[in-house]
Amino acid sequence: MVQQTLRQEVRRLGPGAKLSSVRQLMSEHRVSPGTVRLAMARLTAEGLLDARPGQGTFVASRPGPEVVEADFGWQGLALGSARVSADAIASLLTLPVPGAINLAGGYPAEELQATELVSRAMTRSARRPGVWGRMPLEGIEGLRSWFAQQLGPAVAPYEVLICPGSQSAINTAFNALAAPGAPVLIESPSYMGAMIAARAAGLRLVPVPTDRDGVRPEILAQAFESSGARLFYSQPTHANPTGATLALDRRQGLLDVVAQAGAILIEDDWCRDLSFEKTPMPPLVSHDRNGHCVYLRSLTKAAAPGLRIGAIVAKGAALSRLTASRVVSDFFVSGPIQETALDLVHSPGWPRHLRDVRARLLNRRDILASAMTQHFGDGSVTLLPAGGMHLWVRLESSMDEVAFATRAARAGVLVSAGRQWFPAEATGSYLRLSYACAPETSLRRAVEILARVKGETKNVKRSKPRSPRGPAPTRTGPGPSRTRPKSASA
Ligand SMILES: Cc1ncc(COP(=O)(O)O)c(C=O)c1O
């Protein structure tokens, strides 16, 4: 709104004219300074405004690109159809709207990040001799050893590859471990970024239903058999979005099924550092002898989104292929970033930070869960996760969760509509609510707003099950319509 008005103002004033101050614009439009600055920054980026430090902001003297419109239409023909649609990645890339209460984010709020520790580690690391030079392709030795030690004797440092975060690791795994057109099994629901990466690699997603204890080994066995898949992407610990953890009595059974299928399990252990349990269950890879597990781990969630460090652990030919794929995509991870991560995880402040952030997340989880139960009823919170950042919340099954999320955003609360977390049709009406991004003090207020939105959305009914990306893919596995799935919230 402000941006549009400013645009008109720019046209009216003409080149060289001075714009009103931020303060004046704030009071004219009754918005926050952040909103005005954001609008100004966008128009400056478009070349319409010229910010002169100490003097103010002026209408640019040269015409911006808005005046002389470029024509990119020819690119549609040159590029053909997109493997990753802009719509699909929108919710991964969108930054929170200033002023809104963000229950939709994927990283902890800044006050929960280890920014101080990371900054100090970076200052030390950036000065280390040779740090800006070429790094070993697989990663620096110290960091590989640290990741290996975390997993116990089953993993040696040479089996660890350092990569820039786990999204990159997922992408590498899908590209290196299956050919385009191959099926890949995936828990339903699952992490949206993994589904997008699989589709971008040309893989065919085969949903495997889950319940509050994760995947049932016998259903996984059926899925391997009926689909012919040799790859299974899974989050056994505090899965995003459901929060479910694979039950102890299913773990060996699941590993056996993967081995019998001659398949590879991609274990995405994305939030091991954010577990609320005293002794979280060890990752499946620590029981894997024969290279059936490719394990992914990341530091970004517990440290800071900008410390883009993760690891891939693999054995045998899978390790060679993953290494080759890593080299093809970006040679190696920047030395100062790797050294910073190594410095950070060995610093005395790191365990303190982890204890603190876990305690604060646990507190936020309880606040959000109790407010949801109060306003949305007992069964609304499908599971109280023992780690991570999200609640998977069930709405009345007739309610359209996309309409709900749109109205909630208008009312100032950002939530993530459940549909986009399903590899095929959603099995009900769900929201993913994050308790990690918004200030703790605004969580209750956010739920009160959502309760009002619920009242307004009551009459917007879900028409029929819809997949997150148009028509459902051909289902070869035990998707929702073949096997009666226990839903994630059962
Ligand atoms: C399950 C899961 N895996 C991987 C990632 C990617 O995280 P990063 O690339 O920051 O390590 C995310 C981020 O939200 C996630 O939720």
Image: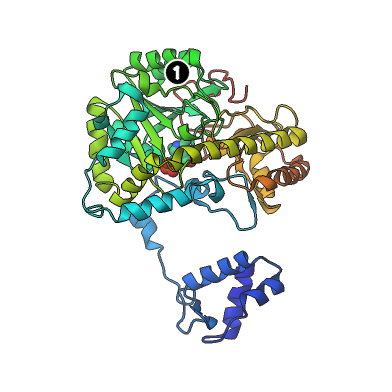
- Residue designated by label 1: 220
Quadrant of res 456: top right
In percent of width and height, residue 484 lies at 57, 18
Image check: 184 left or right of 411?
A: left
Depth order, front residue of 278/147: 278
Q: Is residue 169 visible?
A: yes
Kind of residue indicated by mark 1: Leu
Depth order, front residue of 406/80: 406
In percent of width and height, residue 206 lies at 44, 27
Image check: 155 left or right of 86?
A: left
In percent of width and height, residue 2 lies at 63, 69
> Most extreme residue toward the front, as rendered?
348
How are the colours assigned in the image?
Answer: rainbow
Residue 343, above or below 148: below
Q: Is residue 196 visible?
A: no
- Residue at mark 1: C-beta within 8 A of ligand 1: no
- The count of marks equals 1
Depth order, front residue of 448/79: 448
Image check: 44 left or right of 336?
A: right
Depth order, front residue of 122/218: 122
Q: Quadrant of ligand 1?
A: top left
Graded by Cα atoms within 10 Å as few (under 14), some (14 to 19) or many (20 or more), the crowding at tag 1 reads many
In percent of width and height, residue 43 lies at 52, 71
Image check: 177 left or right of 246?
A: left
On the rendered image, what quadrant is the C terminus found in? top right
At 26% from the left and 46% from the top, the residue drawn is 332
Residue 153, above or below 471: above
Secondary element at tag 1 = helix
On the rendered image, what quadrant is the N terminus found in? bottom right
